[in-house]
Image (cartoon, rainbow, N blue to C red):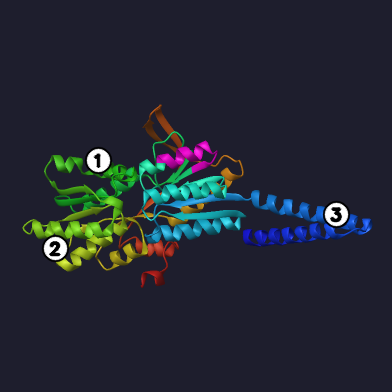
């Protein structure tokens, strides 16, 4: 629709220019007056066309990356939801590069966005962008995460601490004692420490009683599956006498890196492997016994809720929230109105029920 408006306004400009030239050449007063009326009418049409474009609800959407299946799916859902309701969806993918994300925000400023949905590459660039957006009167919605900035307007998210607690609780239920590897997401992103805090809250008593032996505990830059692959391989190669009972990983993409390493290493005992997102790849790995569980983040729920809130903000309405996210900022305690999306465990016992509910399709899981 936006393209049609642009073409339409361009054609009107051509007509205005043509009639202006004819006016200069004409000496007949009646013809001159007639052409003046035509020019005036065309100019009014042009103004209307430009206003129609300017009145659009322009939503800028910045993803830190679109490498993961989940984000690809959510991008499509959000775009469809916004455009079906006459909004303009402007996508930017930073590919995990903070400089690219900053540059892309400048491009969105030129586009004249009303609302910004953002998934940040890291806290530093995220805080900078959110502050600039506020200075330009742009409403910001943090997508599937949180940044402690007093300039942030809203969050739509899952409870990261709860994700960590669910993964650790599941591991502890099935492996109450043994050697645990904990591989967190990017430590520069506030999600990763929150997930780890949930894990340690659950595992703490077991660690204190020496039932749980933490043999590896580190963050993985950019939540990178290839780095996970190398770390798992290196650990097994350097510690051949020490078996691994559990690998707690902070995303399904990271879990895929660990699985790749284990398939090459062929350990005598396959460890319990966790993840989060509930991706199709994770579900297939669960059904094949390679990954044990994942924490389902319902893509449709978070994408549609975020899109709805963005449209409401663009229309000058106050969106519904169901909680707050708290942090300590420079000026003291910060409380950001938030909408929390519920979480679920995905494992071999819950997948059939999730298929019945339409969360997954049998054919997509190759079942």
Q: Position of residue 181 (x, y in %)?
A: 18, 52
Q: Assign the magenta stretch its main secondary structure.
A: helix
Rounded to the nearest angstrom, the CA distance separating label 2 from label 3 is 86 Å
Which residue in the structure is indicated by mark 2?
269
Rounded to the nearest angstrom, the CA distance separating label 1 from label 2 is 27 Å
Q: Residue at x 76, y 58 (%)?
A: 17
* Left or right, 61 with reference to 186: right
Q: Are marks 3 and 1 in contact (CB under 8 Å)?
A: no
Residue 237 forms part of the magenta stretch: no
Segment tinted magenta in the rendering: 127-140
Residue 137 forms part of the magenta stretch: yes
Q: Position of residue 132 (x, y in %)?
A: 48, 39
Q: Residue at x 71, y 54 (%)?
A: 49
The mark closer to the camera, 3 or 1, is: 3
Q: Which residue appears farthest toward the left when viewing the image?
A: 241
> SS of the residue at dot 3?
helix
Question: Which badge, 1 or 2, is on the more N-terminal residue?
Answer: 1
Q: In front: 311, or 352?
A: 311
Question: Which badge, 3 or 1, is on the more N-terminal residue?
Answer: 3
* Left or right, 12 with reference to 125: right
Q: In front: 367, or 29?
A: 29
Which residue in the structure is indicated by mark 3?
36
> SS of the residue at dot 1?
helix
Which residue in the structure is indicated by mark 1?
201
Q: Position of residue 75 (x, y in %)?
A: 47, 58
Quarter of image, res 318: top right
Q: Residue at x 41, y 57 (%)?
A: 71
Q: Where the N terminus falls, by quadrant? A: bottom right
Rounded to the nearest angstrom, the CA distance separating label 3 from label 1 is 77 Å
């Amino acid at each position: 629709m936006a393209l049609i408006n642009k073409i339409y306004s361009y054609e009107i400009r051509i007509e205005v220019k043509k009639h202006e030239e004819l006016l200069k050449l004409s000496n007949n007063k009646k013809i001159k007056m007639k052409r003046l009326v035509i020019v005036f009418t065309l100019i009014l049409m042009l103004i209307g066309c430009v206003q129609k474009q300017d009145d659009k609800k322009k939503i800028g959407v910045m993803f830190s990356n679109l490498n993961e299946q989940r984000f690809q799916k959510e991008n499509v859902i959000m775009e469809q939801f916004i455009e079906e309701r006459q909004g303009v969806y402007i996508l930017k993918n930073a590919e995990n590069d903070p400089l690219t994300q900053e540059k892309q925000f400048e491009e969105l400023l030129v586009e004249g966005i009303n609302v910004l949905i953002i998934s940040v590459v890291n806290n530093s660039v995220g805080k900078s962008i959110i502050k600039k957006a506020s200075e330009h009167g742009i409403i910001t919605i943090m997508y599937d995460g949180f940044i402690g900035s007093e300039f942030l307007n809203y969050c739509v998210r899952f409870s990261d601490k709860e994700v960590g607690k669910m993964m650790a609780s599941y591991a502890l239920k099935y492996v109450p004692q043994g050697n645990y590897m904990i591989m967190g997401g990017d430590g520069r992103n506030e999600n990763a420490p929150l997930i780890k805090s949930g894990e340690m809250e659950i595992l703490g008593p077991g660690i204190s009683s020496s039932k749980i032996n933490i043999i590896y505990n580190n963050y993985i830059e950019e939540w990178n599956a290839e780095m996970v692959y190398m770390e798992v391989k290196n650990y097994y190669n350097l510690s051949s006498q020490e078996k691994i009972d559990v690998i707690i990983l902070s995303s399904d993409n990271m879990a895929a890196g660990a699985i790749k390493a284990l398939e090459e290493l062929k350990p005598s005992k396959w460890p319990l492997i966790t993840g989060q997102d509930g991706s199709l790849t994770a579900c297939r790995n669960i059904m094949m016994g390679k990954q044990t569980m994942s924490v389902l983040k319902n893509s449709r729920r978070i994408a549609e809720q975020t899109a709805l809130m963005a449209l409401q903000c663009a229309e000058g309405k106050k969106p519904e929230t169901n909680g707050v996210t708290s942090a300590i900022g420079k000026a003291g305690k910060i409380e950001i109105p938030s909408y929390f999306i519920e979480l679920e465990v995905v494992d071999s016992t819950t997948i059939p029920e999730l298929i019945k509910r339409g969360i997954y399709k049998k054919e997509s899981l190759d079942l």
